Image (tube, rainbow, N blue to C red):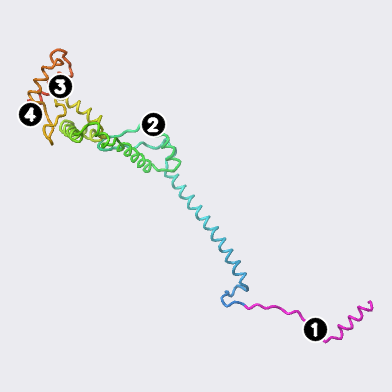
Amino acid sequence: MSEEAQVEQVAIDEVPSGEMEQPQEVTQERPDWLPEKFERPEELANSYQELERAFYSRKDQLRQQIISEINEEAVSSAPISPADYDIPEVEINGMDISVSEDDPMLGWFKEKAHSLGMSQSEFDTNVKEFLHMQMTQGPDWNVESEALGEYADKRLERVDLWADKNLSEEAYAAFAGIPASAAMVQLFEELMELNGQPQFNMTSENQFQERLSKEDLMSMQNDPKYWKDKDPAFIAKVRAGFAQYSRGK
């Protein structure tokens, strides 16, 4: 041992053991709010973080499980293939509406319905709603009436009264399902004339002519289309007018 080391050792040996400087331990008071199973607040924080991670992991698993079960249930209620959907019978305003199997729109909807897992009942409901929407979408009467003039509403009323009186219940139901348009009114007015009705004519502010008078019919007989050209449609119109006049007497 060197001389310096010997001197240092002697100095240490001469210091009383009680006077040797001991390292001081830093003690931290335990908070009153800390649960007994935790020694330090850090342990509580770590436990909370682990619990939070487990909760969100379980939440994601549960969400995926619910989605999977819903998808499985939807698929199980759908037909085996898109082609297995039956076309529902649709009745709108008393009319039977049929859908062609060759309709490309129908084929697309079957594919889409099957991919969404629609049941036959859900498929039927959607098809019926679509057809009803198509049937109810029609011309705007406010626009159509302008083409018929001042008495457009009266002309439509007259056509409706004639159809109600002369058509069968089934035929009138079909007529009622036709959207009101200027072309529709003019078509039926022409049919009415062929049936012996006069051209639309207002006899007063609120009434229209319902049938040809005897003078009207005699005037029509003097028309070249009746006695010279012998127009079949015109002749039929005159004869129908006389028949209606006779019934109304």
Q: Nearer the viewer, residue 239 or 103?
A: 239
- Secondary structure found at label 2: loop
The amino acid marked with disc number 1 is Met
Q: Quadrant of residue 15?
A: bottom right
Q: Earlier in the sequence, mark 3 or mark 1?
A: 1
Which residue is found at the position 69% from the left and 78% from the top?
26
Q: Position of residue 235 (x, y in %)?
A: 14, 18
Spatial CA distance of label 3 from label 2 is 41 Å
Which residue is found at the position 45% from the left and 49% from the top?
70
Q: Earlier in the sequence, mark 3 or mark 2?
A: 2
The amino acid marked with disc number 2 is Asp
- Secondary structure found at label 1: loop
Q: Dot 1, how many residues are within 10 Å of its Cα: few (below 14), some (14-19), or many (20+)?
A: few
- Secondary structure found at label 3: helix
Question: Mark on residue 20?
Answer: 1
Q: Dot 2, how many residues are within 10 Å of its Cα: few (below 14), some (14-19), or many (20+)?
A: few
The amino acid marked with disc number 3 is Lys
Q: Quadrant of residue 108?
A: top left
Magenta stretch contains residue 27: yes
Residue beneath disc 4? 248
Instruction: Tell me where the magenta segment starts and ends, as one range.
Output: 1-29
Question: Mark on residue 103?
Answer: 2
Spatial CA distance of label 3 from label 4 is 16 Å
Q: Position of residue 223 (x, y in %)?
A: 13, 17
